[in-house]
Amino acid sequence: MKAFLMHAGRDFDLKAPLPWNAEALVQDLELDTLFDAMADGDEFLREVARVALLTGGGNDIDTMRYRQAALQDSLRNPQAVRQIYGSVVGTITGRRTRGGLMWLGNYPGAILSRSVELLEAQVAGLRELRHLCEANAGRFRSPAFSTLFEMLQRELTDEYLQTVEGHLKELKFRDGVLVSAEFGEGLKARDYVLRNALAEHRNWLQRLFGPKQEAYTFNLHPRDEAGARALSELRDRGINIAANAVAQSAEHILSFLTMLRTELAFYVGCLNAHDHLEAKQEPTVMPDPSKPDERLYRFDGLYDVCLSLRTEKRVVGNDLAADGTLLVIVTGANTGGKSTFLRSVGLAQVMMQAGMFVPATSFAANVCDAVVTHFKREEDTAMNSGKFDEELNRMDEIVGHLTSNSLVLFNESFAATNEREGSEIAGMIVDSLLRHRIKSLFVTHLYEFAHSFVGRDPKRIAFLRAERREDGTRTFRIIPGEPLRTSFGEDLYGRFFPGEPLEDDKDAA
Amino acid sequence: MEQKVSEARSKPRRKIPTGSEASVGNAAGANALRKQAPGTDAGEPSHGEGSRGDQSFESILFARSGTYPDAADATEPSCFGDLNLDQVVASVTANRAEYNLKGFFHTNLLEVDDVAYRHEVMRDLERNEMRDCVLAFAQAMKTMREHFAQMEKIFVPIQKQAWFLDAVDIYSRGVLDLTEALGRSEPRSRGLRGLLGWLRGYVASKDFPAMRSFIETLQADFAKIRYCVYIRGEGFVVHRYEGENDYSAEIEQTFRKFQQGSAKSYLTKIHDYVEMNHIEAKILEFVSLLFPDPFKRLAEFCRTYQNAYLPALVARFDREVQVYLSYLEYIDRLRPLGLKFCYPELSKTDKSLLCREGFDIALATKLAADDTVVVTNDFELSEDQRVIVVSGPNQGGKTTFARMFGQLHHLASLGFPVPGKKAKLFLPDNILTHFEREEDLENLSGKLQDDLKRVHDILDVASGRSIVIMNEIFTSTTLQDATFLSRRIMRKIIALDALCVWITFIHELASFSKETVSMMSMVVPEDPAQRTFKVVRAPASGRSYAMSIAEKYRLTSDDLEGRLP
């Protein structure tokens, strides 16, 4: 029995190895904000959201569509999804099941009776789950949910549940324990196999009164304590196997329930995030993924979901239509929304890969098996030479892991040296990425670098700029536009240090 | 009947070794004799000698019997501490204490043919198939010994008999497998061919196959037995198994649909003692009543073979072959690091020497633990050259070089492959070393005296076939004194015509005469603080700042062209 809500024929792996750059990605895209919104205070939901989003690079278009359909079902029936999730969680953490398989004790007898008790509670939970599915079956249309519901109704029939309950009764071994054995090393008994004692009990009566079968009986002397211990150990050996089988069954059911909980948790997390965005009337849309070998960006109203989740007001959205573009260079005023824009593209890609909705009014992009970030590290206080070394060290690491369908996001990279040298290195690297058809977005102040790509290959290179009105105010919108020679740092400087002459320093730089 | 056997078995004729004490029998060693497993007939084997095949084979280590003192009496040569060979031998023989091998590593061979005999065997054993079959045999013998040790702790007569059966089974299968596998892998060495001939005679003799078939029939009969125990509160019933259902399987079947990958095991670890408690003994007794025949024949097997199954020669081989195996195992740990071993060309008359990529094997072992590879070195002596004078900066690998020189010669005289890619060495009668001893430093005048006494003792023993290694002697006196003393000693060594490595800070010694050859420990020319432990020079190049960092991280256009997908 499988849940299969995340993949059409495969379990979702909560322990899947995260991409090598997961930590940097979380930091650079500020993903924690999104995880928190999906978690709504529940650590488990957060963990599932985290893994689902960070491992999205491995998903193909079919998986994304599979999840999108299930998510649409969930958005249509949020109450039912939350109720089923609650029931599963209840069975896993209920009064009789809470301890799970943790405290079974050290004796086969104790393991057996505890496991039987656990199974009894689990079977009750499964019965409830089946009833819930029966009640909601008609309202879910996605392949993921309808398959799950059908499977539960097919496998957990009343008849089957009764058979299980029958075994649970028998496993108390009221009639004694029958084991078979063979000879192992030095004629010690080995390969103990538990035999059906119920049948033995019947046979035993038959042997007493029927035809004689050769058998030897030994009765313990009442004061033979060592003998009693030895015999009880022998009984334990017999029960041991049954205890193992029963405990393993309980574990299997627990892991089925846990898997169901895990896979449902993703959709519950999506519902949580959706509620937050809906409450402030931010738009969301199911993205349209296209083949990995295409190079495509086309979106309207794309906003930084994490920025939106952190602020009261709605945030500015941006549009772009850049089919076939390999390299997007973003220049322009400081605090003009360039980094936010860069993050919004990365976030939308990550969310699309995971099968989530994206924060936009429309969004289409080719599938990328990895989103990689090379952001200037603000907190790095090392000396400049060390900083530049560190930047290239990180770039080396990125190159070592890069796949042809990656998306590389550069934020003020290679600026930890003078502009000429930084431009030289940035140009060299970006040139190589272009030659290898690797998609990248580059937010930069390096005029020499940015300008060197102007007019070179308009089909594959696009230029965007942070918008600045005539009066100098920022709109935080990113619009098409080639790099301008002046940076806007002096604006900012002028705001904080009004009245100082700046011309000298500018020339010197 | 059974009672009788069990009494007999409970009073073994000799003291039986237990557990770690258990030692491997070497029929030739008195010490080993006392420690033999029961059943080893160290004196006259009960099997007809005539059926044994090759009579000339005696030892896998020695081409001729009686030429060298018994390994048990061989004490550690005095050079071992200085050359770190004590560490090497301890490491080589670690985990093999039961074989008591160290003495073999102390006994250097004096004849070129004795060395050749071992080279042949070693080359055979370097072939995996050959080594595997000997290793398998050694493992069988070891398991057999463990069985005898275990038997001593068992008091249920039937069970004791069963352990004896197993032990003899393991031994005899070991011998059969060895004979068969050896034959298949066609040894080329005199040693292993001799052994094979002997083994073929042994396993073809009348008694051996009879013993095998006795064992096999018994085992087959016991394997067929299956019985049931029905346990109730007050006791139990034992009867034959009659096809009762496997209830655990039924449970598993019912819950199969929930299976999610593999579950953890909830089997309680019920401690399995080899010994039986009285309930188990009672059950075994009941089973012997249900199936009486094989139990009767088991008792008979024990009476027949109790003291007559292991020929002394097999026991001796089992021990001695460990010398080869232990050394091969040891050098196989170093080979993956790229270190080479070779079979040296040896002579006891020709003193021209050659070594390529030699190294200090003790240091190599130590460095290997930190995944570091030792630096290798070459040396060469031709015509009249006899003395290598090593000078140069401290910590530059001079002592390591001297140790390597000594180790190579000792290992070569044990008949082993030596650390190096290629080697032509001298087969010495003795290796004499004088290394500076830290602990003598309190009294300087006393130290010079001690130095001279030690040098004197060395020259007393040294012959034209000896190897002398001097490491920084006479450091406790003035340069003038030291130079004077050194020149005197040098003259004596040259007069002896001994081979010598001499580490010294006295440069004059390097050009003492046509017999001396100068070598120096080297440093990196650009960074004299850095030692190479070798004579190597490396050019360096400067580059522009950003680009040179990009180069360092392989991010230039050319690099990226190759690296990007």
Image: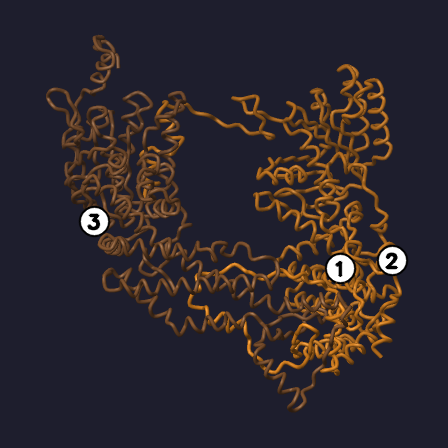
Chain colours: A brown, B orange
Which kind of residue does numbered mark 2 sit on? Arg
**Circle 1: is it few (<14), some (14-19), or many (20+) Cα within 10 Å?**
many
Q: Nearer the viewer, residue B554 or B223?
A: B223
Q: Is residue A330 left or right of residue B335?
A: left
Query: Residue B538 at x, y = what percent?
Result: 50, 28
Q: Who's the residue at 67% across and 44% down the image? A: B418
**Residue that label 3 marks:** A286
- Discs 1 and 2 carry the same chain letter: yes
Mark 1, chain letter? B
Q: Which mark is residue B34?
A: 2
Q: Who's the residue at 76% across and 29% down the image? A: B435
Q: Quick check: can you spot residue B439?
A: yes
Q: Quadrant of the N terminus of chain B?
A: bottom right
Q: Nearer the viewer, residue A144 or A467?
A: A144
Q: Nearer the viewer, mark 3 or mark 1?
A: 3
Mark 1 or mark 2, which has the lower sequence index? 2
Q: Quadrant of the C terminus of chain B?
A: top left
**Circle 2: is it few (<14), some (14-19), or many (20+) Cα within 10 Å?**
some
Query: Residue A228 at x, y = what percent?
Result: 72, 68
Mark 2, chain letter? B
Q: Is residue B169 left or right of residue A434?
A: right
Q: Which mark is residue A379?
A: none
Q: Secondary structure at mark 2?
A: helix
Query: Residue A303 at x, y = what percent?
Result: 21, 37
Which kind of residue does numbered mark 3 sit on? Met
